[in-house]
Image: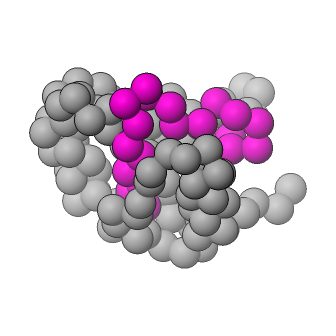
Amino acid sequence: MTRLTASFWVQAYLTRLRLSDIPAFVVHHGDDVAGAVLVKLNTLDGQARAFQRSFDLQTGARRWIELLGGIEGEVDAAIARQRGFDPDLWVIEVEDRGGRHLLDEPGLD
């Protein structure tokens, strides 16, 4: 099965968020072809959550899991550490008081 490039997936995700009136922006531009994507959900109350895509080796399914949640500064520090290990990493920040991120919708896995 052919995989989408990272930049194509990011643009599709940003478009879907925009269509739902959810503000989002690229914090760090990773590798266009094969960069991993990390999504930070900022609930605008001092809290945040970070999500990364996980691959289930037994089923072959991909899904988004919460990597970390808590005080926004701590989430930002963890993301910065992750970027230190992976310079090809994309970081997308989503801002929504209601906690919407759309990662659980079909087509975004």
Q: Residue at x 61, y 65 (%)?
A: 11
Q: Position of residue 85 (x, y in %)?
A: 28, 57
Can you say which quadrant of the picture contains the C terminus?
Answer: top right
Residue found 76% across the figure and 44% down from its top? 107
Looking at the picture, the colour scheme in use is: one colour
Q: How many numbered tags mark residues here? A: 0
Instruction: Tell me, yes or no, whether the highlighted magenta stretch contains residue 100.
Output: yes
Magenta residues (range): 89-109
Query: In the picture shown, does residue 36 fall above or below 54?
Result: below
The quadrant of the image that shows the N terminus is: bottom right
Horizontal side of residue 85 vs 106, given as left or right: left
Please tell me which residue lies in front, 91 or 16.
16
Answer whether residue 54 is visible to the viewer in this image.
no
Q: In this view, does 61 lie above or below 13?
A: above
The location of residue 55, given as percent across then percent down, is 62, 37
Tell me which residue sits at (21%, 53%) in the image. Answer: 80
Name the side, left or right, on which 97 lies relative to 84: right
Position of 8 with respect to 27 (left or right) is right
- Using the rendered view, name the quadrant where residue 71 is placed: top left
Identity of the residue furthest to the bottom in this view: 32
Residue 10: percent from the left, percent from the top? 57, 61
Q: Does any portion of residue 105 appear in the rendered image? A: yes
Closest to the observer, 97 or 28: 97
Task: Measuring from the top left, give residue 104's x and y in whole percent.
Answer: 64, 30
Q: Is residue 78 magenta?
A: no
Question: Image point 44% across, 54% down: which residue?
Answer: 24
Name which quarter of the figure residue 26 lies in: bottom left
Magenta stretch: dominant secondary structure: loop
